[in-house]
Image: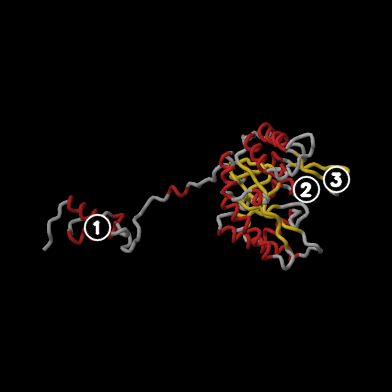
């Protein structure tokens, strides 16, 4: 015997059924109501749906609208290398100039009692610990265990001090370089990157003059040999130029692998000093096309740290802080960025 069911009863029954299971189907619900009230008519749209439809129809048109990447955003830091190991003074000067981030070298591990002490000092100065320069990886046989241990000590220090990245370079072997050296370096960098990732620290390979990664094609070979998931590129724009490359093109090429950058300038000197015909200088005083570098970063929507670096003050009459001010003024007045 069929029971009379009011429209209100229909709706109550439908709601109860829908709430009973997360996988309920509107068409199945309508057919269920029909089973208790033969007079209920299934809407034509739902009657045409297959009985085993997992989800009800939904409007997916908004997925046709592309989701654009966020615009470029630069965080400007400064490297403490210019202060030659006087890192407390470097922290004070960099913070006084208004830079929000700092890069330090591995000598700080012996300079401070604990990573926590360094973390507190940086927090008081409102400085983010962007990266630690961890030194070079050797491709010579017999030193792999030692190198891995050293870089893991440094990675743990970065983590405990609240830092972000571990910068790694390489050392030329004391023999002619072979093609296998690039493959081996890529494998070693990958192993360091994997172990550092377990600590929450990302590894960036720093291209550098006087290393396996001196020329653009050498950088390509190294990065091609390394696992892209664990080894990113920390592009030093001045070293890249001195090695014969165009850093703007490198930014385009490695747009999805850029970790952070060293913003740096270099000039040619004659006669050479200590066998080098170049030296690094304050921003705007060399021949690196820095406007093109930042235009490329905007083009690829880079969002991250750009660390200004100057290995040493080129003019002894200036202090490291004065050199940093020159670069800051260039960044703000010529490039229109705010530190």
**Could you tell me how far apart the alpha carbons at marks 3 and 1 are, in whole angstroms?**
84 Å
Q: Nearer the viewer, residue 317 or 99?
A: 317
Viewer-side residue, 53 vs 202? 202
Q: For label 2, count other residues whose C-alpha is less than 10 Å away and answer few (under 14), some (14-19) or many (20+).
A: many
Spot occupied by residue 201 in the image (x, y as percentages of width and height): 58, 54
| Viewer-side label of 3, 1 | 3
Crowd band around label 3 with a 10 angstrom C-alpha radius: few (<14), some (14–19), many (20+)? few
Horizontal arrangement in the rendering, residue 279 relative to residue 123 (left or right): right
User: Which residue is tagged 2?
Assistant: 242
Q: Position of residue 175 (x, y in %)?
A: 81, 64
- 2 or 3: tag closer to the N-terminus: 2
Q: Residue at x 72, y 68 (%)?
A: 142
Residue 244, numbered circle: none
Closer to the observer: label 2 or label 1? 2
Tell me: residue 272, above or below residue 318.
below
Residue 273: mark: 3
Q: Is residue 58 visible?
A: yes
Q: Earlier in the sequence, mark 3 or mark 1?
A: 1
Looking at this view, name the residue that lies furthest to the left: 1
Position of the N terminus, as image quadrant, is: bottom left
Alpha-carbon distance for marks 2 and 1? 72 Å
Residue lying farthest to the bottom in this orientation: 142
Residue linked to disc 1: 17
Looking at marks 2 and 1 on the same chain, the residue that comes earlier in the sequence is marked by 1
- Give the position of the C terminus as an image quadrant: top right
Mark 3 lies on a secondary structure that is strand
Judged from this view, the residue extending furthest toward the right is 271
Disc 2 is placed on an element classified as: helix
Mark 2–mark 3 Cα distance, whole angstroms, equals 15 Å
Q: Depth-wise, is mark 2 or mark 3 nearer the camera?
A: 3
**Residue drawn at x 63%, y 63% as measured from the top left:** 191
């Amino acid at each position: 015997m069929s029971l009379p069911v009011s429209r209100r009863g229909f709706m109550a029954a439908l709601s109860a059924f829908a709430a009973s299971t997360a996988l309920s189907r509107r068409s199945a619900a309508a057919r269920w109501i029909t089973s208790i009230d033969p007079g209920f008519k299934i809407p034509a749209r739902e009657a045409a749906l297959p009985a085993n439809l997992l989800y009800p129809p939904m409007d997916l048109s908004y997925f046709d609208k592309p989701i654009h990447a966020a615009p470029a955003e630069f965080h400007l830091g400064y490297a403490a290398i210019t202060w030659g190991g006087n890192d407390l003074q470097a922290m004070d000067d960099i913070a006084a100039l208004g830079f929000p981030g700092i890069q330090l070298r591995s000598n700080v591990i012996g300079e401070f009692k604990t990573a926590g002490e360094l973390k507190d000092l940086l927090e008081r100065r409102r400085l983010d610990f962007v990266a630690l320069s961890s030194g070079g990886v050797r491709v010579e046989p017999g030193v792999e265990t030692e190198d891995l241990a050293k870089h893991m000590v440094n990675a743990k220090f970065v983590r405990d001090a609240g830092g972000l990245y571990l910068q790694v370079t390489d050392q030329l072997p004391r023999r002619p370089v072979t093609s296998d050296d690039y493959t081996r370096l890529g494998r070693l960098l990958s192993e360091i990157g994997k172990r550092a990732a377990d600590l929450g620290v990302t590894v960036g390979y720093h291209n550098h003059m006087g290393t396996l990664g001196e020329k653009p094609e050498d950088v390509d070979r190294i990065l091609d040999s390394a696992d892209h998931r664990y080894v990113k590129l920390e592009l030093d724009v001045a070293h890249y130029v001195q090695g014969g490359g165009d850093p703007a093109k490198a930014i385009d090429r490695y747009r999805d692998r850029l970790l952070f950058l060293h913003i740096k300038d270099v000039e040619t000197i004659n006669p050479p000093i200590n066998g080098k015909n170049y030296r690094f200088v304050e921003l705007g005083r060399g021949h690196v096309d820095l406007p093109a570098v930042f235009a490329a970063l905007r083009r690829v929507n880079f969002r991250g740290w750009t660390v200004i670096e100057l290995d040493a003050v080129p003019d002894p009459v200036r202090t490291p802080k004065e050199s940093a001010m020159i670069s800051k003024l260039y960044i703000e007045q010529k490039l229109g960025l705010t530190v």
